[in-house]
Amino acid sequence: MRSTERRPAVVNKLARLRRTIARWRAAGETVALVPTMGALHAGHLALVRLARRRADRVVVSIFVNPAQFGPDEDFATYPRTFAADVKALHEARADLVWSPAAADMYRDDFAVRVVPEGAAAVGLEDAARPHFFAGVATVVAKLLIQCLPDIAVFGEKDYQQLRVVTAMARDLDLPVKIVGAPTVREADGLAMASRNVYLAPDERAVAPLLHRVLKLCAEKIAAGRPTAAILAEGRETLERAGFGLDYLEARDAETLRLPAKGRPLRLLAAATLGQTRLIDNVAVP
Ligand code: AMP
């Protein structure tokens, strides 16, 4: 019987994960990995569906990775909804949920970190969260080596992360194709995110402005208006609405360096509303 008719297997020991994937491989099946920190929403499930279409077997990892949280961040309170996640993954027809214990991922004497450069050091998320990309790259490298998937799917929602992971796989010769998936949004444009549950009702009402401003800026820049002036306007609109702005920037869509003429552009923003930090980005058409 194909596992799509059963609940996904929940696995938390590496030996069992490897045995299961080896069995699939022996049967000639391809494997996709979708790394997550759980608290799944429709954005995560769209990644799972994309993976489902691209591979015979889909592994979804659920691991709230302590290494990517700073000392003042929300690791302890990050939303954890494991039972509901497994149910949603059953409906999305995932084959296996990989949920290792933190003590197994990081032994007491854990001593190797992957510290990415390039897109991880361009003054966007890395400026606000200096610990973040080494934490992400280290855990994603481990997950990729544990599962050895044909493809791994990441959301464009975390655009800088997608660029960093793509470069890591390329630079470390990891035999995996990194696939980006479009951002899934609420009806009012707000990018879905596990942390959106932190937003108070008045903050939730203002939150969609972040995407609206990004889109408007992108349209104006595409129409040939001067980038610097358009971004300055956008920053002012967000700050007037009560956002604490970390950045609103136009960057080279691939390297995330300052844009050069004739290269595809991406607009990226991060801002806080009260205690909640939102990030979003759009392509310049
Ligand atoms: P997280 O659990 O927040 O670490 O996210 C796991 C994966 O889901 C990452 O590749 C994210 O980029 C992706 N993701 C999160 N939110 C969305 C969204 N609204 N649309 C598409 N992908 C998303």
Image (cartoon, rainbow, N blue to C red):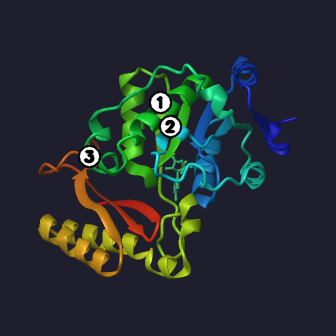
Which residue is identified by label 1? 138
Q: Residue at x 71, y 54 (%)?
A: 81
User: Which residue is drawn at the image coordinates 68% and 26% (left, top)?
Assistant: 29
Q: Earlier in the sequence, mark 3 or mark 2?
A: 2
- Residues packed near mark 2 inside 10 Å, few (<14), some (14 to 19) or many (20 plus): many
Query: In the rendered view, would you say 138 is above or below 126?
Result: above
The spot of residue 122 in percent (x, y) is 25, 44
* Amino acid type at image mark 2: Ala
- Tags 2 and 1 in contact by the CB under 8 Å rule? yes
Q: Nearer the viewer, residue 52 or 256?
A: 256
Identify which residue is drawn at 52% across, 32% down.
139
- Report if the beta carbon of the residue with label 3 is closer than 8 angstroms to ligand 1: no
- Residue 44 at x, y percent in the picture: 59, 53
Q: Is residue 248 visible?
A: yes
Q: Residue 215's quadrant in the figure?
A: bottom left
Tell me the residue that label 3 is attached to: 256
Displayed quadrant of residue 24: top right
Mark 3 vs mark 2: in front? 2
93 and 12: which is toward the camera: 12
Q: Which residue is found at the position 43% from the left and 51% from the top? A: 158
Foreground disc of the pair 2, 1: 2
Q: Residues within 10 Å of mark 3 (few under 14, many from 20)?
A: many
- Quadrant of the snapshot with the C terminus: bottom left
| Label 1 crowd bin: few (<14), some (14–19), many (20+), radius 10 Å | some
The residue wearing badge 2 is 67
Helix or strand or loop: what does disc 1 sit on?
A: helix
Disc 1 to disc 3, C-alpha distance: 21 Å
In this picture, residue 165 sits left or right of residue 221: right
